[in-house]
Structure formats: C-alpha cells, structure tokens
Amino acid sequence: MQTLTMRTFTARPALRWLVPLAVLLVVLATFLATTRASAKAPLPEISAQDLLVKVADAKVDGLSGTVVQNADLGIPAIPGGSDSAGGKLTSLLSGSHSMRVWYGAPDQARVAVNDEYAETDVIADGSTVWTYDSRAKKATKTTLPADAKADESQRKAPAGAPQTPQDAAKEILAKITPTTDVRVDPEVSVAGRAAYDLVLTPRDSASLVKQVRVAVDGENYTPLRVQVFGPDDKVALDVSYTDITFGQPDARMFAFNPPEGTKVTQKAAPERKEPTAAQKKELQSRKAQADRDTTTVGEGWSTVVITKLPSDATGSSNATLKGFLGQLKPVSGSWGTGRELDGTIVTAILTDDGRLAVGAVGADVVSQALAR
Amino acid sequence: MSAAEADVLEGGPSTTTVRRGRALPLRFLRSELSIIFGRRRNVALLAVLAAIPVLLAVAIKLTSDGDSSGGGPGFFEAITSNGLFVAFAALAAELPLFLPLAVAAASGDAIAGEANQGTLRYLLTIPAGRTRLLLTKYVAVVIFGLVATALVALAGVVAGLALFGGGDVILLSGTTTSLLDGVGRLALSVLYLAACLAALGAIGMFVSTLTEQPIAAIVATIGVNVLMFILDQIPQVAWLHPFLLVDHWTAFGDLLRDPVSTDGISQGLLVALAYAAVFLTAAWARFSSKDITS
C-alpha cells in the first residue's frame, strides 16, 4: 500500500474519479455534437417562392430511408386497444414511431412500421397493394383496376386552379402572408443532408401553433422533415427522415409473396362510378346542412370552428366515445357545459348539447367563441 | 506486489513485469471463470435459463391444436410454424429479468464476493495489479453473459426443432428465408444481447466495488435494471428513453427484418459502450483507490 501513494495518480486517489467523469463528458459531448450537427456549408439563398416552385417541380427517381415520428399532441389515448385498426392508427398520435420507406415510382412504394418484435408492411407495386401484419399473420391483397392509371390522367384540375407551379407558389404565398411570416432558413441539416427550412411563423400570438418548419433537401427538393412547434417552443409534431438514400431501391422491395400460414384477405378496389342524380342530391343537401351547422369565429391561425354534430354521432350508444370523453376535463361557461381537450397545439370543447368547437388556440379563446 | 501494481498503473517499462504479465492473464482469466462457473448459485441460474425455452416450447406444444392463430408476446405466434422461433421467443421472454439476473449475479459477486469471504487481500498479493484484476474479472463476467445468452438460444433451438421442426424461416417483413439464414440471425442476436448485458455487467462491477456484501451488490444491480425497464414504460419521460440502457435491448428483433434494420442495433451498441466505459472507469477509480480491509 505504501508504494501506491508514491506514484502520481495515486498521490490523490480522488483524482481517479476524474477518469469516469471525463468519459461521461466525452459521451455527452459526442451525443450533442451528433444531434446538434448543422449543415457543413450553408446553401445558396433562395426565396420562399422559388423554393416552393422547386419543390413542386422536384422529381425523385426513388429513395429509401427511415422516418421517425415524434408526436406530443397532448391527446389522451383512445380506448379500444391497440389491436384494432383504429388503435393502430391513433397510436401514431403519441410517442415515437419509426418506419422504413422505399419509394420507386408514384405507384411503387413500401412502408414498414417497425414495432417491437413485429412489423406492419404496406407494399404497392403498381397493380396490387398488399398489407402484411406479422403479429396477426394476416395479409390483405387489393387488386387495383387496370384502368386506374388512365383514370388519374383523365382527372383534370378544377377550373381556376393555378396551372403552373410558379402560379401555385405565388397564390399560396399571397394567401398566407397576411397571417403568417414566411422565411427560408438555408442552414439546417436533416438526415445528414444540407437542407432549406421553410419557416412559417403565425403573426397571431393567440395561436397555440408558434411555428411550422418544413425542411426541404437542398439538392433534390424532397421534403425531409416537418416540425410543428407549440407554446414554449415545444415540438408538438416532428416527422423526419433520420437517414435517406436517393436512388432506385431494389425491385425486390416492391414484390410481396404472402408467407406460408398467412391468412390472405382479398379486397376489391372500390370502383369509381358516376354518382346517380339522387346520390348527388343527397350529397348536396348534406353539404348544405353541414354548411349551416358550421360557423367560424376569428380568422387566420386563431380561427375557431364550431360544428353542430349530427345527433347520432354523440349518441350514448358509442362506448368508445364515452370512454374517451370520460378522460377529458369537464368545463362550463355561459354557453353551457361540456368536455374540454387540451392538446399541445389544439383545443377542442364538445358541449353537452352536441356542439364541437376546435381551434389552434387556448381554451379561453375557444370558450369565448362558443359564447358568441 | 506493489512494484508490479504500480507498473501496471503506469504502463511501466520493467521488462520482467511485462513478461510475467503476458503469461498471467489467461491463467488468471481461467481461474476467474472457474470461480464464476463453479458457484452453485450461478450454475442453478444457468439451469433455470436453459429450462425456460424448454418449458415454453412444451407449453405451446400442449396448448396449440395445430391452428396458428396470432397473438401472444414477442415471436410466440411464429413458434408453431418454425421451432427456431422458440429461441427468439425465449430470448425475448428472458430479456427483462432472467438474463440480467445472471449477469448481475456474476458481476455483483465479482469484487464484493471476494471482499466478503476475506479473499480479496490475498488476491491482491498476486503480481497483477488492481486494474488488471478488475479487467480480468470483467472479461469473465462478459463471457458468463455470453454463455448464458447462448445457452438460452441453444436450448430454444434444440427444444423448438424437436417439438415443432425446422424449415424455412418467415421474417417479420413477410420474407421467407432459409433455416441457415435464420440460425445466423439468431447467432447475431445472441452476440448483440451479450454486448448489451456486458454493459449491465459494468454497472454490476461498479456496484460490487462499493460494498462488501455480494447479495447487496446483486440486488442493487437488478434494481437498476428493473428501474430502467420501468422508466422505459413511462411515456411522460419519453425524452429519457434513448439514454436508458434497456431501451435498445429489444432491438435484437430488428435482425429479423428484411433488410435488417440497423438503426436500433447500432444505437443500442453505442449506448452499451457508453455505459460500459463510464461504469468500468468508475469501478476502476473506486477499486484502485479503495482501502482493502478484508
């Protein structure tokens, strides 16, 4: 023991603790350096309008990558279990999800949602759409009508719609600039790629949405990330590629053969038929009714939409809805009583007499809109 | 002892020490391994680990009437179609508690066990130095973790193939591949999980240097493991999850995707490396400056 103390490091044993501390600091520094990495060289400046045009014109010859979605919308879980299709979908409203994406052509794509020890795949090869659920060992096969492609090309843009991307970009900007500050940040990095960030900042401070950022690849003009910021710059929604490779994926990715022991359900694609006169009439009357039942209060980002729900929607028979509403905070005001959903970027109040008020604003504003 | 020890600490130039040190590690490691694998407690743990896949396979064989309806925890639904999945299901089932328990038992015992039996000071008289002693003990713990994981997989493969047969393997993405490919993926899963458990072993080594009660060290290590699993289930601390060691353990399932999803696994390995580095150096700082009184 005596000689121990003679050596430098051992002269003061407490100094040894600096080693694990240094290792910890190196780990943290590496982590920060990799997550906060910014673009190596800023991209050339570009106006918001030019950027929108480039995005509209962008042609991607295929890509593969991983998309991670983080959502903190503050919406409570909807009961019904995660086994139901609805449960699977609504589970995307909260937490972190990772999916792998392959894209070959507009009608050739594959999305694989990675679950723990399980996977859900959607594969489209142009003529067939497969879904595969590894846990349930179930697959569905939807055969697309042979004329589906021709159909799409026949569908014309409605009259009055902008014809060129330039016009469209101009129109979009003209519509949103009165309420929104639009700028382009050329110095972001997403999935290791230099990108432009289209930053939309609502001018109205009453809105719960503080900022929307859409990152666009600096080379291919493919959207790489969408972020929505709520109060206190909290990220309410973040959908972004964590890695992306441009180039045609292996053709194998778009071929699917249901493995042995899989229950395959055949589904026919819904046929597109011209609606009959009676159907058209009913649609129109429904639309008119909906228009009468819906009012908006406020404008721009702080618009509150108030809808009178059809009486059957809030019927007491719907157990799922009842269970969901039971989780919400009861509120009351001069407009009556109801239940309030306090999301991160959205507030909704469902009154007991069946009116639904929704807005990207605080509860007080929604309540005021109802009282009007 | 002191000269050799100091030389190891300093990376000293004394040739005699170096030569003696070269010959020593293997012998030293062998004796450490014989201590770990000789403990009746550890042998019993290994037996339990190996029994679980067998139990699992028998239980599923007895209850399934040939129909392969889905459901159940990880990989259970695939067992009836291919016995190889007994091994994957067993790894998934033993991952939260049994495998960590084995590693905690070996690592928590490493230093505290010697201290408790009063053999630590005699051990320190061999010309190896405390750093080398600690490292050798850690390597033995890592080997024990690897053996435990491989044993679970092996017992699963044997029981599964005997009861359900082999054949082509259906991956999570719905791709069918050969049995050999499946076995290769199982081997990679075992290596990945052994690396993850090695990081837990480093935590166990650190705890073991803090106390002279081996049981306390084992319980504390298991406690840390369970605490991390609980935190990993709480959505309110989602920001913490990527930093938890256990959060990435289930990523071994990514090896069964087509193509293999490497994100989770590489993250898991990096986190494991970070934990191992921090806690091993902390164990070193504690152990090499500790007064050994027993």
Image (cartoon, coloured by chain):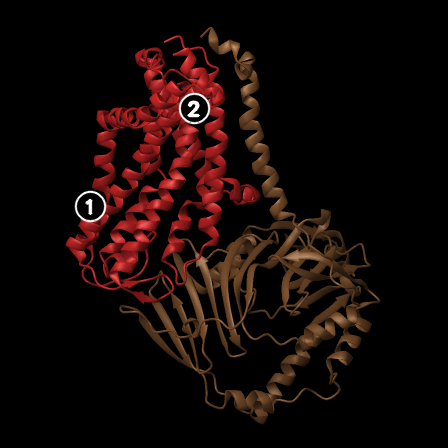
Chain assigned brown: A
Does A263 sit above or below residue B282?
Answer: below
N-terminal-most mark, 2 or 1? 1
Q: Nearer the viewer, mark 2 or mark 1?
A: 2
Q: Hey, which residue is sitting farthest left in the picture?
A: B162
Residue at the limit of the structure toward the right, as seen here: A178
Q: Quick one: label 2, few (<14), some, or many (20+) residues within 10 Å?
A: many
Regarding residue A112, the answer to whether it shows in the image is yes
Which residue type carries mark 1?
Val
Q: Nearer the viewer, residue A327 or B236?
A: B236
| In-front residue for pair B13/A47 | B13
Q: CA distance from mark 2 to mark 1?
A: 33 Å
The quarter of the picture where residue A275 lies is: bottom right
Amino acid type, mark 2: Val
For the residue labelled by badge 2, is the local secondary structure a helix, a strand or a loop?
helix
Determine crowd level at label 1: few under 14, some 14-19, many 20+ residues with C-alpha closer than 10 A.
Answer: many
| Chain letter of the red region | B
Q: Residue at x 42, y 50 (%)?
A: B251
Which residue is disc 1 drawn over?
B54
Residue visible at 35% across and 63% down in the picture: A136
Residue A237 point in image, percent of width and height: 63, 56
